[in-house]
Amino acid sequence: MDNSQEKLPELIRMEDFLRPQNVQEYSKNVHFKWRRNPVDNRLENTSMLAFLLSAFWNVVFFGFNGWNVLEHLLFGHPNTQNPPIFSITVYFSIRGLMLYLKRKDIIDFVNDLDREWPQNIASQLEKNMDQTYLSFCQRYKFVQIFSMVGLPMFCSLPVGLFVLTHEGNEVPVSVNEQLLGGWLPFGIRQIPKYYFFVWTFDVICTICGVSFFLTFDNLFNVMQNHLIMHLNDLSKQIDALDPVDSVTNEKVFFANLFDLVQRQQLLNELCRRYNNIFKVAFLVSNFLGAGSLCFMLFILSEASDLLIIVQYTLPTVVLIGFTFEICLRGTQLEDASASLYSSLTRQNWCIGSQKYRKFYLLWLQYSQRTQKLGGFGLIEVNMVHFTDIMQLAYRLFTFLKSH
């Protein structure tokens, strides 16, 4: 046996990419419990409990707060909302609603990716599956550490502020001393003796929102990573084409060519479906993300208490960081799709047969249409879009400061 031969890793499965975060498992907020059907080997979701529980808490939270907003607008009653927190809860919940409405499309898409899955170690290494999985694991651990540290810190900071600064049972609980703020019946949010009851309710709602965000984040990134892996592999196969073979071995050459074009069409269709799953979230996030970031920056610019600054810094970092990554992922997918066209332009097609040269021109024209992420033709999700969101947030922030 050759000792210099590289040791192959274990066979990687699709399920390895679909692991929930510890926060979701501990809180029983796993929205997709993946399991293979023993009959047809399809991946399926075995439980809707997390969606149902999350829906219940969201209806309660937004029902109470929506009532408060209506009372304020129609009758002039006091508005007890915390705008930056309320906007980011809407931001997270929109992602959860999208996951629920698109759950069947998500399951079908995951199974389509699973059908394209390399079934042995050699083919997985050929497609650089090991690098894709390594990248996934590194990111998974980072998100895991951030969620396990950041979520408890975010939830406990208002408690610390309440314990350290609240002046007595006769003084109402301020918005800054609450985790989420908003409105609850009988004014119990402002009554100190009910503080920890209200805080527990807020923690439950926070975990629901964070779980929605984590599920969305993982599915979005796993799907994108696999599409890029397949596009890069197809690009390598196109690079390996030798037009001379269209003359010397026409039958085999065109059979291989037919497979490549079919695969390109399949990947383009998968990219289209991938965008359709997330396009509503992209469009809504364009406005909600900028609005939430604007409110967060405004609070940070006005705050003087260290605990308040730390509390609002955490969601601000999350918003900026994950918005940046989503836009970066869109750019990466666009670049991977464009690499197919680049591979064709590098080809010495002139030495091919007349039949291939005619086919090549049609293929080149088809490959010019790169795949992009966007929202109903109104936005394109790329790094330019990230700049637009940051500029919009800054303009809203300066408007608030000036008024």
Image (cartoon, helix red, strand yellow):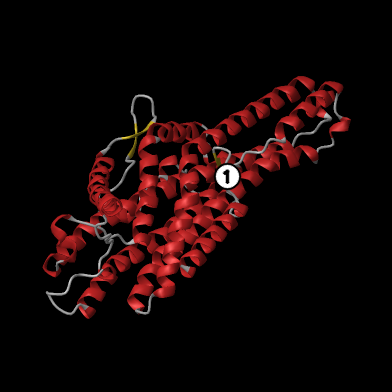
In the foreground, 56 or 346: 56
Which residue is outermost to the right?
A: 351
In the foreground, 349 or 176: 176
| Residue at the image point whose x is 25% and y is 40% from the top | 52
x and y, in percent, of residue 316 in the image: 43, 64
- Residue 367 quadrant: top right
| Tally of numbered tags | 1
- Residue 403 visible: yes
x and y, in percent, of residue 324 in the image: 53, 57
Image side of residue 260 versus residue 108, left or right:
right
Residue picked out by circle 1: 379
In the foreground, 109 or 128: 109
- Residue 119 visible: no
x and y, in percent, of residue 62 in the image: 27, 49
| Circle 1 SS class | strand
- Residue 269 quadrant: top right
| Residue at the image point whose x is 30% and y is 46% from the top | 30
Circle 1 Cα neighbour tier, 10 Å, few/some/many (<14 / 14–19 / ≥20): some
Which residue is outermost to the front?
A: 75
Q: Amino acid at mark 1?
A: Ile
x and y, in percent, of residue 158 in the image: 27, 70
Image side of residue 200 versus residue 120, left or right:
left
In the foreground, 195 or 39: 195
| Residue at the image point whose x is 38% and y is 55% from the top | 87
| Residue at the image point whose x is 65% and y is 41% from the top | 337
